[in-house]
Image (spheres, rainbow, N blue to C red):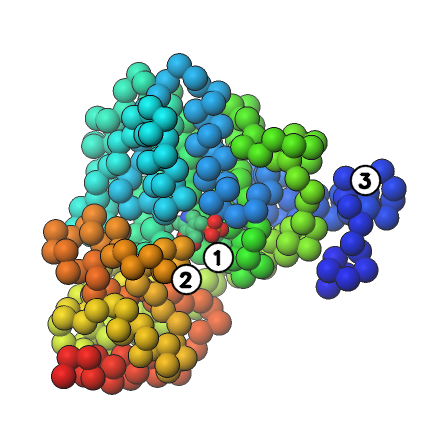
Amino acid sequence: MPYLTTEWGNPSSSYKFGSHLKAVIEKARGQVAELIGAYPSEIVFTSCATESNNTAINAALKTNPGKRHIVTSSVEHSSVLNHCMALEKEGYRVTYLPVDTEGLLSLTNLESVITEETVIVSLMWANNETGVLFPIQEIAEICDSRGVLCHCDAVQTAGKVEIDIKKTKIDYLSLTGHKFHAPKGIGALYVRRKTPFIPLIHGGHQERNMRGGTESVPLIVGIGKAAELARKHLPKYENNVRPLRDALEDGILNSIPNTELNGHKKKRLANTTNITFKGIESEALLILLDQDGICASSGSACLADSDEPSHVIRAMKSDSEASRQMIRFSLSELNTPQETTSVINAIRKSSIVLRS
Ligand code: PLP
């Protein structure tokens, strides 16, 4: 609260009322760094993960002007996919790696598409729609052995899976605060020491010249504190969330006919479940669930107003209907067993209405 009310100075100014806030920002930088085992100097605050993802890919390309090939996957978040599509229009070549029916990626395939022309491999750690995990350690090893930069969108992983960045060969890693209970509108980018970098947002000297613009002190304090709490809760996260998610998932799959899990059952986050309800349009089910006060989604929240079927499920399943008939539920430690029971009951009721 003080940073929204009384402590409204500008951290970049020379007078103490503002400049003492530099220490507040550095404390938050340390807290975010600790969440992923990085050095504080490797963390740059951004406005969101969309900016972090754009910044990482832009930095790799601009610092390697002779190379024009990017590798990513067909199930990335729109902040990577749409950026890559825009880059194709500028003459870059992009390989969108496919996934199998369980959402998994082939490392042999990855190795085979990297060429002398490849600048960067940008792959997510956990998928935002299915929770499916990519083997990012191995991916980063492959990149390192082939002399290619590795960017990881770890938005869904932070606070849910232990990240020890020093044990990986990842060069850039994107985070966003609102996935671990920080306010919306604040993100971070990890840039490994000595990794080539150029800012996306040119401006003042903020963020050690890596991202211009006056720092949002309240949001930075928010992501710092949230990172500290996420780190503290991490050891118990799986044990707290997985039983809730499994109860919800099993309850739906066992009691509602013609339902099917999307994504690998084991190789995924503990909090996400993505289920196809055959014969039921996602949007119709979401409207009924919303009336019962249940918040779920049919794909990425960033594309919720686009009427587009899920590109993630489309990449996994040849059945085109499946991408329009799925719902994603994401749980947190703050959900309760009573909530999972009432969600199962509400879905059962709604599916009977929609199938009758
Ligand atoms: N990457 C993934 C995997 C996401 O799930 C999201 C958002 O939900 C983003 C990137 C973009 O994050 P932001 O909304 O902070 O830009």
**Alpha carbon distance from label 3 to label 1:** 31 Å
- Mark 2 residue type: Glu
Assign the C terminus to one quadrant of the image: bottom left
Point out the tag, 1 or 2, that comes first from the N-terminus: 1
Mark 1, Cα crowd under 10 Å, few <14 / some 14-19 / many 20+, is some
Point out the tag, 3 or 1, that comes first from the N-terminus: 3
Is the CB–ligand 1 distance for label 1 below 8 Å?
Answer: yes
Assign the N terminus to one quadrant of the image: bottom right
Q: Does the image show residue 165?
A: no
Residue wearing tag 3? 13
Pair 3/2: label in front: 3
The percent coordinates of residue 232 (x first, y second) are 57, 58
Pair 1/2: label in front: 1
The percent coordinates of residue 113 (x first, y second) are 24, 26
Q: Residue at x 50, y 35 (%)?
A: 55
Point out the tag, 3 or 2, that comes first from the N-terminus: 3
**Alpha carbon distance from label 3 to label 2:** 43 Å
Residue wearing tag 1? 179
Task: Specify the quadrant of the image occupied by residue 255.
Answer: bottom left
